[in-house]
Every structure is written in structure tokens, then in C-alpha cells.
Amino acid sequence: MAPFMDGTAESPPNNKPKPSGIHVLIVGAGFAGITAAIECVRHGHTAQILESYKSTNVQLGDIISFGSNSSRIFKRWPGIPEKLDPICHRSEKLEYRYWNGEHIYTQYWGTEEENFGKRYNGHRGEIHKIIFDYAIELGVDVKLGQKVTEYFETDTEVGVVSNGERIMADVVLGADGVRSKARTLVLGYNDAPKPSGYAVYRAWMDSSELAKNDLTKDLVLNGDSHTGWLGPDIHFLAASIKNGKEFSWVFTHRDERNVDEGWSEPGNHEDACKLLEGWAPEVHAIVRMTPPEKLVDWKLVYRDPLPTWVSPKGRIALIGDAAHPFLPTSIQGASQAMEEGSCIAVCLELAGKKIAADALRAYEKIRYERVRLTQKTGETTRDAWHKADFTKLKENPEAIKLKREEWVLNHDAEAHAYKMFPEVVKELRQ
Ligand SMILES: Cc1cc2nc3c(=O)[nH]c(=O)nc-3n(C[C@H](O)[C@H](O)[C@H](O)COP(=O)(O)OP(=O)(O)OC[C@H]3O[C@@H](n4cnc5c(N)ncnc54)[C@H](O)[C@@H]3O)c2cc1C
């Protein structure tokens, strides 16, 4: 059998699971933290989240993608797929063009969704709100306005200091994103991010102006569309959503400036258009029609793979971006963050309260290689697009298509954890 593919195991029913007595404290209510909390509750643990944002803001962010491997997790949460469907992008193909607008290749998704499961591409804030509300409904204790400043761990205790208060648990999950503080505790040193050499201009906007413009109307008037323009060291992707009513675009370009750790900063039309000199007029029109307050420039930071995601005494684990930032070209950052929650919940269930530390070490062992290989796909796709030999592409246009690999997309994190845990724990104890 191919690596990371175990079919689908029996998932616990969504009615009352057997209580494990394990209390899981999670720092961060991003997709990693919320998924971990929901999955922990589904598997019989109690979960509390501490999040520094004072409120959930549906405006924050723009397009985010969930592959079939994470939609499998959404599918186990009653009512969630039905809420995601109407707000997500739907199209059967991605059309690639050269930077000057000439057609290169059209990639059809075919039976991928039937074979592996649905994909969801939509607005980060809107999708986040749906699963945030579901976590509350399930009984997750979410505390907003909590800034965690310290993590501690002794032979008998683990916890955090948040807003000056010590809060204890059986295990702590650092789901605190790319600027993780938990990472410093786990590693024992500060791991500063490095510039990746790239940044992304991005926007999400209403498409009514695009619909009136001859250069752009075809992108929004026929329902949802998905188009990519490729040129030397730049790719520009645009998608219309909600039957063409809303529009999102991202364009990745070289950026040698210093790393600002914020996930985004205001973008500038002139700077963006300068980088697109000689590009198709429809691309310029999209940028120019973007309301200034909607345009952001998002620096892509890079980190070397961490040697470990688990603290010395085994009771604090990093999950999601805190453990491993992904390049957007992997289209897997949020999906891998979600897989982590599924895996940990199973490991805690199988380990039990007394040896919860084994659960976190097993989680790392089960996940590490898969995450490393998936991260690599981000670099491979970026290089295939940015460093393409554009003269040779005419002979082999398929070379630029997105790889849709079964080992990434047809993976069931929960089933995989059930299968791997016994042998991984045996190895850890030897
Ligand atoms: C506001 C925002 C908007 C984003 N928009 C997009 C987007 O449009 N497209 C896209 O592809 N990706 C976006 N991302 C990144 C994307 O969500 C992640 O790469 C991915 O989903 C992995 O999620 P995560 O939970 O590991 O990290 P994140 O989503 O970054 O979540 C980490 C959470 O931890 C909280 N936190 C951090 N430090 C502390 C602390 N000390 N105490 C308490 N809480 C803390 C943060 O406030 C945040 O909510 C965005 C992230 C954020 C935070």
C-alpha cells in the first residue's frame, strides 16, 4: 500500500464518547487549534482554547484552501459541509495562461472529488467563523482576549501563564501560528524566521466592477472561474466565488526585504503593477480595480524544519504553523494543521491519561515525515511555475499542472493514527 494511505477506519460516533479524563489546553484558535479542540471533544477529552484576539473577525484574511484530506475531517462534523458548500468556490477547471494572456493549458479536476473527497476554497474569516461556532456548540471552552506569555512544564505539571494567571492541564498544544512562543520552549532557543525570498500581493473583493469591464467580465459573469497567469518568477492566480459575485486574487513575486513577522501589511497598486510590466491588460485591470483597503502584501517567511515538535518532558506539542509553516503553493497549510488535531485526539485516546506524554511523542512520529514531504510540494510547484522554461512549455504544457497526488489528498489522519499508534509507541518504548 502507498505510504500514508490506510483507507477509512471507524470514526467514533458523534454521540457521547467515553470520557478519558484528559484535559487539553490549546493556545491559539486558528484552524489548528479549533480542529484539535473539536477532535479532542469527539474522542472523549475536554478542551479549552486561549486566544489572544478579543473577538472573531470574519473580515480577516482572504482565500484559503482545504484539500480532500481535510474535508474528510469536516465531513465528520454534522452540519458543517452543508454550511461550507454555499460559500466556497466551485469550478471544474483551472486555466493557465502565459503572462501576456495567451492560453497555455487547462487542468480539469475530473473525478478527483468523487475519488478523494471534496475541496473547499473560500474566505478564511467566513470558514473560520463556521467551525469556531461549531466548537462552542460542542462545549469547547474558548477564552478570547487571552495573551499567553509563558509555558511551563515540570515532571508533574504542565500549563501556561495567560493574562498573568497560571492555567494547568494534562497536555498543552501550542497552536499559536507562525510567530509561536511555544516553539521557543519546545526547542530551548529562539528560532527566528528567515525571508523566503518571496511575498504575495493578495485581495478579496466584490466583483461588480470587474463585471462591468470588458477585460475582466468573463472572469465573473459565467459563475465561478479559476485562472492562473505564469511568468518569470511570478505567478498570479484569480478565482471568482459565490457564483461570480466575489473575487479573490493572489500574486507571488520576489521580495528581498527584511522579514516582517506580521501575516500581512497594506499593499500598493503602483508597486504591484510595476512588477507586472508587460503582463496582460486583464491582470493590470484586476489590480487597478482592487479597492486600496483590500490590497495586502504578505511576506512569506521560511523556517528550517524543527528537530522536534514536542517539549523535553513530553507534555507540550506544537501543531499547525507553529510547528511547520507551509508555502501557499503547497495548498496544504490549513489541511495539515487540521490533520494534526485529528491525529493528536486519537493518540490521547489510545494512550490514556496516565501516559499522555506518550501520545504527543507518538503524534510527532506519526506526522513528521508526511508533513516534511508535503511541505516540499510547495517548493516543487513554485519552482515549476516560476522557473519554467517558457519556450519549451509550448511542447509540453502539461508540465505546469498542479500535482494532485493521492498520498496527500486521499489520506485519513484519524484512520492513520489508529493504525500507527500501537507500533509507534512500541518503538518509542524500546
Ligand atoms: C488573521 C489571520 C488571517 C489569515 N489569512 C489567511 C488567508 O487569507 N489565507 C491563507 O491561506 N492563510 C491565512 N492565514 C494563515 C492560515 O490560517 C494558517 O497558515 C493555517 O490555517 C494554519 O493555522 P494555524 O492554526 O496553525 O495558525 P494561525 O491561523 O496563524 O492561528 C494561530 C492563532 O494563535 C493565536 N495566538 C498567537 N500567539 C498567541 C498567544 N501568545 N496567546 C494566545 N493566542 C495566540 C493567533 O491570534 C491566531 O489566532 C491567516 C492567519 C491569521 C491569524
Image (tube, rainbow, N blue to C red):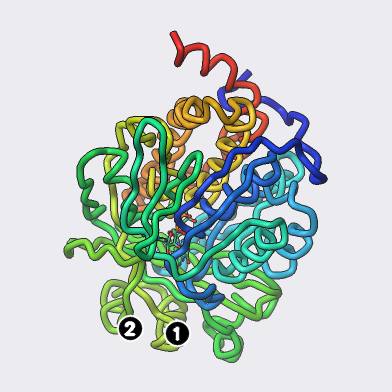
Horizontal and vertical percent for residue 306? 31, 37
- Identify the amino acid type marked 2: His
Q: Residue at x 45, y 30 (%)?
A: 364
Q: Residue at x 34, y 35 (%)?
A: 154
The image quadrant that residue 91 belongs to is bottom right
Residue 187 seen in render: yes
Crowding near the residue tagged with mark 1, few <14, some 14–19, many ≥20 C-alpha atoms within 10 Å: many
Q: Nearer the viewer, residue 341 or 108?
A: 341
Which comes sooner in the sequence, label 1 or label 2? 2
Disc 1 marks which residue?
A: 290
Q: Nearer the viewer, residue 385 or 49?
A: 49
Disc 2 marks which residue?
A: 269
The secondary structure type at the circle numbered 2 is: helix
The answer to whether residue 196 is left or right of residue 33 is: left
Q: Are marks 1 and 2 in contact (CB under 8 Å)?
A: yes
The image quadrant that residue 277 belongs to is bottom left
- Identify the amino acid type marked 1: Thr
Q: The N terminus appears in which quarter of the rendering?
A: top right
Q: Nearer the viewer, residue 44 or 75?
A: 44
